[in-house]
């Protein structure tokens, strides 16, 4: 059963910030910007794809780990080939196959209906001679360790937006312009430790996203997009990042001080760069959203320095260590950070995952309770899938007893053992079979999945829907909110609050369509085990982006669902 699907609220948010009309069809035209004239990829009928557009200077050398700098290398007279994607940012080589990896990766991609081509020259009244389209901007997930924009082609999303109708306010099609963007992940974007904190090098990936939004605010009108009607959305870690951007909007709006941070400002009169936000499977208060303990980050940094032949950052040698880190070749960094057999992991007492997370810098993150900080009062939607807990507990591949599964759950997520044990000690008669009624699954799996899903995603979603709808997260609000927010209040605007919606995706993906592509099950995992995962984390993405059409095993029902989702 499909309870509430993402494009429903996409259209709701876009309509909320005023409808757009379809302009007359025009042939594909180059787009003139201060950086040059962009020539699009027109290989998909009906869509102009402007790919691999740089929005920041390459973060190389002294800019490695640092705040992104606005792109200024362009020449208004140059002709730019925007027909292919840029490489992904440096990360695990699993992401290399699509278009390579590089530190010079801060690019974005713009997709627009061919019919929405605009004349970039303003008329005498200062307005565009063609209506500008609302803009939908996607921030990918991947635990802030990996990911790339090329995996989320938005051409189908744009094509289906031509069917977006509103029966009362505007019966005509209301197309959108869509954007995907790269940002630094892993060690180059979210490494957190004492040395980086002292040198203002925390949260670089968030600053990349902010600078991309600034670039769009300044340039998207030339491509046919309305800079005053931009909505951001993200999934998983991208959803957490969306929340941080919403938080930062409140910080910028409330701040009266002058800052030299290149990723700040550039929005409307309140400093805002976007008008609405959508969070899929991630948001404030989630147990999956954790910072990096200083001792953990420092231990990893010292291990990295040893493995790379750099001096220790201790005893006042931090600048020498940082200079060495910036001088190491990209290939050497990748070898040490993304190879579990490298000398880095061999020299540590135990395996430590790349310690990435949001770092307390006094600006983007003020305290460990950053989910409780003020947020911009803009329209927002937060949702999740039915069985989010499957991601955090993992699908059991041979766990015969409740005790063995419980041990794995606690190892993967540090929840209180007594709380989980309360569920596990119940008998099957007390607990029931669970949501899926899979006769081969032990009760413990379903109970554990439900507990994890509630703790990690569902409860925080409900709390924050209530907080945002009531205005409790507004800047300078002293109201205390209890954990009582619920989906029941979604769509209602309380006094002082912003328009707020909630959703839950409960359409279970077919086994052959989803699991091998997104979830990465090992080949020896039996199908019966995979089925138990239910409506997994990220189950909605195939339908949201419409890439189901390119899957060789897609059946008509899959195509109809994607078409329905994208046309709402």
Image (tube, rainbow, N blue to C red):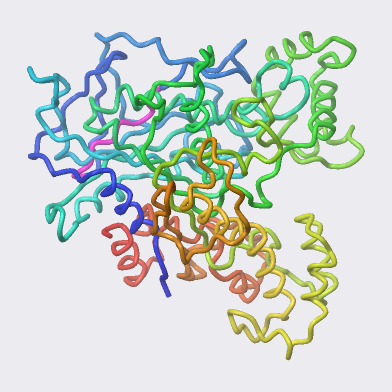
Q: Nearer the viewer, residue 486 or 331?
A: 486
Is residue 424 placed above or below 118 in the rendered structure?
below
Asked whether residue 53 is drawn in magenta, I would say yes
Q: Residue at x 79, y 55 (%)?
A: 414
Find residue 244 and report its horizontal and vertical position in percent: 55, 37
Q: Nearer the viewer, residue 256 or 25?
A: 256
Quadrant location of residue 544? bottom left
Find residue 293 and report its horizontal and vertical position in percent: 79, 36
Part of the protein shown in magenta: 45-54
Is residue 216 placed above or below 480 in the rendered structure?
above
Q: Residue furthest right?
A: 349
Which quadrant is the N terminus positioned in? bottom left
Asked whether residue 442 is drawn in magenta, I would say no
Please identify the dominant SS of the magenta region. Answer: strand
Q: Nearer the viewer, residue 206 or 445?
A: 206
Q: Residue at x 64, y 81 (%)?
A: 434
Q: Nearer the viewer, residue 514 or 241?
A: 241
Count of marks overlaid on the render? 0
The answer to whether 330 appears left or right of 422 in the picture is: left
Find residue 548 and report its horizontal and vertical position in percent: 38, 59
Quadrant location of residue 433? bottom right
Find residue 322 and report its horizontal and vertical position in percent: 74, 14
Q: Residue furthest bottom?
A: 429
Which quadrant is the C terminus positioned in? bottom left
The answer to whether 436 appears left or right of 229 in the picture is: right
Quadrant location of residue 393? bottom right
């Amino acid at each position: 059963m499909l309870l509430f699907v993402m494009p429903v609220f996409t259209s709701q948010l876009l309509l909320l910030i005023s409808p757009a009309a379809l302009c007359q069809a025009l042939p594909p035209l180059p787009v003139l910007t201060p950086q040059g004239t962009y020539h699009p990829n027109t290989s998909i009928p009906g869509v102009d794809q402007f790919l691999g557009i740089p929005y920041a200077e390459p973060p190389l050398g002294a800019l490695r780990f640092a705040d992104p700098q606005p792109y200024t290398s362009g020449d208004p007279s140059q002709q730019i080939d925007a027909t292919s994607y840029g490489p992904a940012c440096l990360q695990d080589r699993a992401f290399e196959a699509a278009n390579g990896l590089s530190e010079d990766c801060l690019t974005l991609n713009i997709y627009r209906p061919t019919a929405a081509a605009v004349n970039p020259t303003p008329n005498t009244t200062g307005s565009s001679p063609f209506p500008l389209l609302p803009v939908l901007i996607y921030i990918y997930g991947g635990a802030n360790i990996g990911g790339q924009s090329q995996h989320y082609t938005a051409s189908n999303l744009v094509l289906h937006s031509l069917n977006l109708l509103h029966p009362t306010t505007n019966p005509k099609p209301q197309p959108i312009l869509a954007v995907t963007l790269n940002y630094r992940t892993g060690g180059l974007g979210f490494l957190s430790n004492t040395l980086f904190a002292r040198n203002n090098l925390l949260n670089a990936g968030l600053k990349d996203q902010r600078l991309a939004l600034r670039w769009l605010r300044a340039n998207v009108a030339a491509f046919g997009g309305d800079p005053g009607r931009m909505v951001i959305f993200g999934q998983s870690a991208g959803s957490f990042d969306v929340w941080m951007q919403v938080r930062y909007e409140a910080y910028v709006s409330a701040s009266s001080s002058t800052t030299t941070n290149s990723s700040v400002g550039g929005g409307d009169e309140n400093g805002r760069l976007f008008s609405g936000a959508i969070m899929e499977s991630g948001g404030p208060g989630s147990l999956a959203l954790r910072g990096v303990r200083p001792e953990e980050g420092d231990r990893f940094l010292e291990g990295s320095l040893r493995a790379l032949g750099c001096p220790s950052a201790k005893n006042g040698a931090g600048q020498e260590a940082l200079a060495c880190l910036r001088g190491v070749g990209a290939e050497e960094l990748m070898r040490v950070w993304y190879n579990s057999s490298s000398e880095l992991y061999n020299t540590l007492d135990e395996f430590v995952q790349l310690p990435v997370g949001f770092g307390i810098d006094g600006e983007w993150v003020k305290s460990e309770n950053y989910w409780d900080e003020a947020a911009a009062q803009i329209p927002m939607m937060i949702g999740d899938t039915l069985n989010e807990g499957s991601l955090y507990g993992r699908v059991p591949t041979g766990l015969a007893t409740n005790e063995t599964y419980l041990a794995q759950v606690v190892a993967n997520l540090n929840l209180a053992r007594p709380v989980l044990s309360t569920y596990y000690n119940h008998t099957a008669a007390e607990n029931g079979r669970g949501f899926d009624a899979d006769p081969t699954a032990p009760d413990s799996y379903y109970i554990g999945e439900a507990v994890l899903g509630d703790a990690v995603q569902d409860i925080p979603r409900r709390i924050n829907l209530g907080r945002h709808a009531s205005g409790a997260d507004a800047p300078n609000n002293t109201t205390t909110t209890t954990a009582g927010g619920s989906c029941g209040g979604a769509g209602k605007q309380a006094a002082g609050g912003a328009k707020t919606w909630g959703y839950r995706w409960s359409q279970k993906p077919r086994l052959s369509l989803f699991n091998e592509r997104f979830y990465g099950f090992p080949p020896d995992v039996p199908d019966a085990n995979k089925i138990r995962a239910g409506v997994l984390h990220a189950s909605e993405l195939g339908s949201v982006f419409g890439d189901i059409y390119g899957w060789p095993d897609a059946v008509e029902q899959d195509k109809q669902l994607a078409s329905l989702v994208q046309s709402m």
